[in-house]
Image (spheres, grey):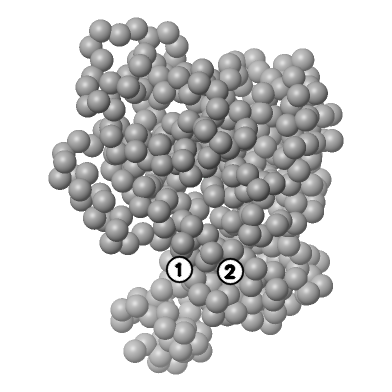
Amino acid sequence: MLTGRRLRIRFSGGGFYNGAVLERLARRNYFRDEGQIDHMRVSKSVIGELEQEAVRQVLERGFLGTGTETQAFERELAAYIGGEVQVVCTNTGTAALQLALQACDIGAGDEVLTPSLTFVATFQAISATGATPVACEVQESTGLLDLEDAQRRITARTKAIMPVHYASAMGDLDAVYDFGETHALRVVEDAAHAFGCTYKERRIGSFSEVSCFSFDGIKNITSGEGGAIVSHNPEIIRRIQDARLLGVEKDTEKRYQRQRSWDFDVIEQGWRYHMSDIMAAIGRVQLRRFEPEFRPRRVALARAYRESLSSLPDVRFFEAEIGAVVPHIQPVRILEGKRDRVRQALLDDGIETGIHYKPNHLLSKYGGGKVSLPVTERLYSEILTLPLHPDLSGEDVETVVDVVKRAL
Ligand SMILES: *Cc1c(COP(=O)(O)O)cnc(C)c1O
């Protein structure tokens, strides 16, 4: 066991552990193999033998493209979400967002209102359609789109609004839909964080015109990489089914019968954005594990963080109804300029953290800070994402909490 006082080991988060820290880590069983430190990860894929077996079966069948496994995943997702929706799976969540916008006739010359505080995927999906993402402020208390600010940014070109369910919370989603109706804007939900969450007792995706999920490696469920569009609108579903397979009309139906289209027509721009059956096989297992395993674990860990840290004067949580909200990430705000100190203390103890997200209006492609969004920019200096994934234990949360308390 590596507990020598003079030993220093570089680890993947950058930086070094010294002897004292190594001893603490050793007590916590963070050594997996000799010389290898398993530091506490901020997010993580949780996959096991069931997923491996499911992939093996697809490989044995020898059909790897989009086929019956993808079709089954789509049906199971639709049944889980409820509300008689249809689902189309894609190779990434980003592709899902792009196709959803395209199916809502959003494209070159159009503007889409969206919060700046989001993963760059939201912005890239919008600009991939030829439209311009218009960075809006978020509310300080929730980290979600500020509709008053969004209203001020409406122009004659504004065609859609894309709310982002940051840290899986939706805030007042009814108000977003009212806003869309008032200003005649399409609403496309970036629900990448919000798989399995409910709003007013209804699952996200079950009541909206079009919502998009991500199943990348660290989301609430994963298919390795992947995404899905959920809609009630058969015309949107049809257009997305075609667009994800190079615009080849009705190719989805053919492929689900293990056939190909040889004589076909193409009427709009399409892409190679379909999901492969290998990915769908992983996703189907993850969907079965979500309610019994992942949901309760994520909810319990998020509640434990709130219980232990919310009394600290320099720590703030974003408002969210944990339970209905199944958090994909656990951001907190650390006030009074103390964020980096806390971050360093956690890193020194082998605990990885994140910063979700660098605001998009600061990125060169999206204006490089030409507009100023003071609330978003202040939050960016305060936010710190603490570890949250289903492989974490209550004890792990206590460890994180202790280090945060000590650092403050
Ligand atoms: C993950 C994510 C996406 C994109 O999903 P990918 O599957 O990674 O392409 C979009 N928006 C947000 C907010 C995300 O976190």
State whether label 2 is within 8 Å of ligand 1: no
Residue that carries the numbered disc 1 in the rendered image: 391
How many marks overall? 2
Kind of residue at disc 1: Asp
Residue name at image x 73 percent, y 47 percent: 171
User: Residue 386, can we see it?
Assistant: no
Front one among 28 and 354:
28
Kind of residue at disc 2: Leu
Q: Position of residue 9 (x, y in %)?
A: 41, 78
Nearer-N-terminus badge (2/1): 2
The answer to which quarter of the image holds residue 46 is: bottom left
Name the mark on residue 53. Answer: none
383 versus 234 height, above or below: below
382 versus 136 height, above or below: below
> Does dot 2 land on a helix, a strand or a loop?
helix
Residue name at image x 48 percent, y 31 percent: 86
- In-image side of 321 versus 66 (left or right): right
26 versus 335 height, above or below: below
- In-image side of 265 versus 182 (left or right): left
Residue name at image x 68 percent, y 82 percent: 406
Q: Position of residue 131 (x, y in %)?
A: 61, 21
- In-image side of 146 versus 265 (left or right): right
Name the mark on residue 301. Answer: 2
In space, the residues marked 2 and 1 are separated at their CA atoms by 10 Å
149 versus 184 height, above or below: below
Q: Position of residue 135 (x, y in %)?
A: 71, 34
> Does dot 1 land on a helix, a strand or a loop?
loop
Front one among 11 and 74:
74
